[in-house]
Image (tube, helix red, strand yellow):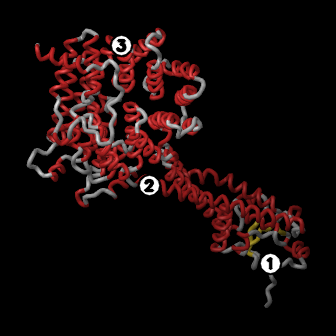
Amino acid sequence: MVLGNPFEQPKNTSSDRRQTGEGAALPFDRLAAHVADLVLLAPIMALAMAPFRRAVLEAKLLDNAYDSDWALIQGLVAAMAVGIAWETFFISMWGASPGRMIFGLRVVDVWTGEKPRPFHAFVRALTWWGSLLVLGAPFFGVYGNAKRRPLHDRVGDTEVRSRNTRRQSSPPQITELAFGSLFTTGAIFFASLVLTSQMYVLREHARMAGEKNQPRLCADVTSTLESWEGGPSKPTRIAAAISLSAAGATDSSCLEVEAEYALWNNQGRTLGYLAKGLIRFGTDDDEAEQYFSKVCDLEPDSDACKMVGWFRLVASENNGESEMTSEMTGETTEHIEKLARSMVPSEGRTARAQDLSPDWLRLLVLRELFVQKADANLILKLTEFPAKHEVVGAKLVEYRTRALWRLDQKSKAKATFFATADALPRRQRVVLTSWLCSRELYESSCSKDALRACEMMERSADADSGDTAVPSFIVASLRNTECRILSGRGSTRAFDDIEKQVDGDTGKTLIEAVRALRTDGADQGLIALRNLASKDGAEEDLFVTEANIRLIEEVSRKPMTDRDATLELVNLRERWFASRNALRYSDWGRALFEALAKREQWGKAAEVGILLSGEYDSDRSLQKRIALAAWKSGKRQWATELAESLDKTRFPASLGDPSENSLGRDDGPSLETLDEKLFDSIRKSGRSK
């Protein structure tokens, strides 16, 4: 017996159709039957998907995209399983689903003409629902062969026939074949793109979910610990995080992440609570106190609790700021100095004993010593011992350099800096070179050391990292550019390069004013400086502070008989006193004192100098000029006390002679009124009393 090829169009189709009364079903009748089945299936599918719909909603409420998508996929699989079971049951039992029965359609085995066997019905149903994953592209196979058999019919060895002789399909024409092939190809291509993109999304969700299950860690702390010396004695993650934060190498978000990790994993809870308190200190003291309390509850005798005692003292004084006295301020300074002395090894102890004071504690204490303007000798002692990481070491170098500068040991400060600058990390090198460049320019104008420090600053800065956009860098670069112009080694075109780095209007205004002063528009430059210097609500803007300093410098150059200049200087003095923290702008105050003393306004100069004397307690040259101004203004008792304190000042032998200056230090601008004989008479007056 020879069987015919079911994939070829039979030659006696018309006679077979007349004998059986059945023919190939129309494509749209098949579509209508499927729609009817889906309408009947919808409630059952909804029940199957109900548990997964709840999981989707819960995942969305928790903002978990991965769990939401995964629950949605599971719900769709459950719905497909219902559809496959529905199709398999009805086709294997009666050869037609309810929807097909409505439209007079029947699924038959292509070989026997009878209803398909259960296995074939299952494979056919599985393929039909699988075709939906590629956007139904295989369904267009009804236009690709004589018996209108798409992919699921070919896989299941079936075909769909219609009992209604008026709604039977003839073999497809050439146009239908072309349309079906083109549309199928396009649909498969588009479906492939959609599936690929969905697979990528799911993979990303899986990666994000995996990262979410991993502990959140700060990358800066991880890289720092990898390069930290000491092997097994390396600090914990939270200790390293506090060290980096105290050194200014990371922001508060990094410290917050590490504190959370330490608390949740019980890896340094004491320092974790301390870190959280440090983050909130100054912004939310009540919440900070809650964390500080936990620190001392866990370890009452620890270094962390000692630091908590310091921050509590500062908070109590800040809360009663309006009634704070000089005695209270002295108590605060004495407290942090006492803590610092307890960290300094006594004579006879080896340098290894310094390991008892961890780097995070040393950096926090050093930072507070500078804030309180405490004994600079303590800062030097705390910075004698090397650090085990370059970031910590760079901060110690910065503190040591600034302490030497405060002690008027500027030659040693510059020697320390120039000996270590190249070994510092880029960020710390930029900070320190910017500071030194500014100090030199303010105090010794365009000296060789100032130009050298400024050149190192410019070489260290990286424009891509945002170093050149920092206000302190821009102000120092602006003064350095002026020095080059005055020495004939630069041009005003350099102002354009600096202006490109500035984002705010105040910075651009300052640069334009300085450009005008150094060209033919001096009057326009002064007007711009006045407008910027008097800007309301911007007293903490460094560019506004620089505008005030420059305005003082320009006014001080005018003749003594210029009454307008004298009046403007008085206004600048009142503006400095009106600032919320005049000593924060000590460069502004120093320029103001020098200008007032030069114009022999001794009373006003003395009032400024009295505030500055604590800021520049080791600058003997400035202290002498302040004492002279106080004496000439009638404040003779205060001048005598200041002169006596200068006589009693002694410097440690390790620091050398204060007058020593191997690098050619300039003590700053000398006043014409500086009279050594008068100063000697002040000291003699104090001794006679």
Q: Which residue is mark 2?
A: 211
Q: Which residue is mark 1?
A: 7
Circle 2: element type? helix
Amino acid under label 1? Phe
Circle 3: element type? loop
Q: Relative to 571, is 247 on the left or the right?
A: left
Q: How many marks?
A: 3
Which percent across, then down, holds residue 259? 32, 44
The residue drawn where x is 62% and y is 58% is 197
Quarter of the image holding residue 525? top right
Circle 1: element type? loop
Using the image, determine if residue 128 lies above or below residue 414: below
Q: Which residue is mark 3?
A: 600
Q: Nearer the viewer, mark 3 or mark 1?
A: 3
Amino acid under label 2? Glu
Q: Nearer the viewer, mark 2 or mark 1?
A: 2
Q: Looking at the image, can residue 217 be seen?
A: no
